[in-house]
């Protein structure tokens, strides 16, 4: 079974600084997706960024970028120029590609605080 | 922008009562999911649904739970006899097709069982 591990329950960053959230996963599949979702206090799950395992290039979305290390099964999220609105719980998630309709497996989450 | 909608946003019920949570997935999506999140805990998979049948379910999804897509637009989760431990946020999600990766989530339905 696939597992996703986020070893940082809490992180904090100063406004305008950069922070990196860590994620590791375990899988025997060769093709899969990885995601970072953001959950603000409203508790809605918002997609931040996605990475397809077959792509070597790291995904970027404006101030958000990932460091995808397939051999190490590591998928970290870097937030640049942190803003107060970035404060939220961040979940790393995995979905295999080989099985149609396969589940999304989440990590435990990292609570990010942005200090003004 | 298309979105997944869920109703009710919050429901309070007595232990032993039946609850139905409703979801309207994005209209051209083919895969549907229910997840739950107990307060302060991780997001847990309950069930996935494709082609009018359950494609996968977790160990949490026991006989007390059922899902249905009654009319081609709604996707419902029924809990037959609620327990205190069913108190959680329930998220519906949908996904477009076999080659699409991400799930799009609704805003969640908070269930409180007294």
Image (spheres, helix red, strand yellow):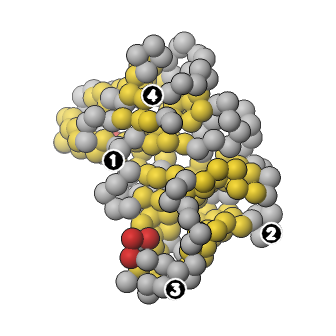
Q: Could you say where residue B16 lies in the image, as x and y percent from the top left?
A: 48, 85
The reply to whether residue A107 is in sight is yes
Precedes in sequence: disc 1 or disc 4: 4
**Residue at the image position 50 percent from the left and 27 percent from the top:** A27
SS class, disc 1: strand
Q: Quadrant of residue A14?
A: top left
Could you give the CA–CA distance between mark 1 and mark 4, rounded to whole angstroms? 25 Å
Q: Pointer 4 indicates a residue of which chain? A: A
Could you give the CA–CA distance between mark 3 and mark 1, rounded to whole angstroms? 34 Å
Pointer 1: what residue? A88
SS class, disc 2: loop
How many C-alpha atoms fall within 10 Å of the one at disc 4: few (<14), some, or many (≥20)? some
Pointer 2: what residue? B71
Pointer 4: what residue? A26
Q: Could you say where residue A28 lies in the image, as x and y percent from the top left?
A: 54, 24
Residues at circles 2 and 4 in contact by the CB criterion of under 8 Å: no
Question: In the drawing, does residue B109 fall left or right of residue A83?
Answer: right
Instruction: Using the image, determine if residue A72 lies above or below residue B37.
Output: above
């Amino acid at each position: 079974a696939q597992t996703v591990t986020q070893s940082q329950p809490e992180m904090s960053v100063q406004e305008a600084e950069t922070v990196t959230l860590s994620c590791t996963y375990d899988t025997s599949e060769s093709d899969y997706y990885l995601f970072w979702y953001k959950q603000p206090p409203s508790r809605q799950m918002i997609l931040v960024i996605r990475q397809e395992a077959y792509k070597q290039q790291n995904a970027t979305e404006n101030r958000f970028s990932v460091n995808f290390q397939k051999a190490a099964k590591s998928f970290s999220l870097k937030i640049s120029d942190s803003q107060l609105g970035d404060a939220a719980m961040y979940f790393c998630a995995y979905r295999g590609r080989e099985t149609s309709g396969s589940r999304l497996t989440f990590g435990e989450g990292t609570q990010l605080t942005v200090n003004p | 922008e298309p979105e997944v909608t869920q109703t009710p946003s919050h429901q309070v019920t007595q232990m032993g009562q039946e609850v139905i949570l409703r979801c309207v997935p994005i209209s051209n999506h083919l895969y549907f999911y229910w997840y739950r999140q107990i307060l302060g805990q991780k997001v847990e998979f309950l069930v996935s649904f494709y082609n009018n049948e359950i494609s996968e379910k977790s160990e949490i999804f026991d006989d007390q739970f059922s899902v249905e897509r009654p009319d081609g637009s709604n996707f419902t989760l029924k809990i037959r006899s609620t327990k205190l431990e069913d108190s959680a946020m329930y998220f519906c999600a949908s996904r477009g097709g076999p080659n699409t990766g991400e799930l799009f989530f609704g805003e969640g339905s908070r269930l409180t069982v007294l």
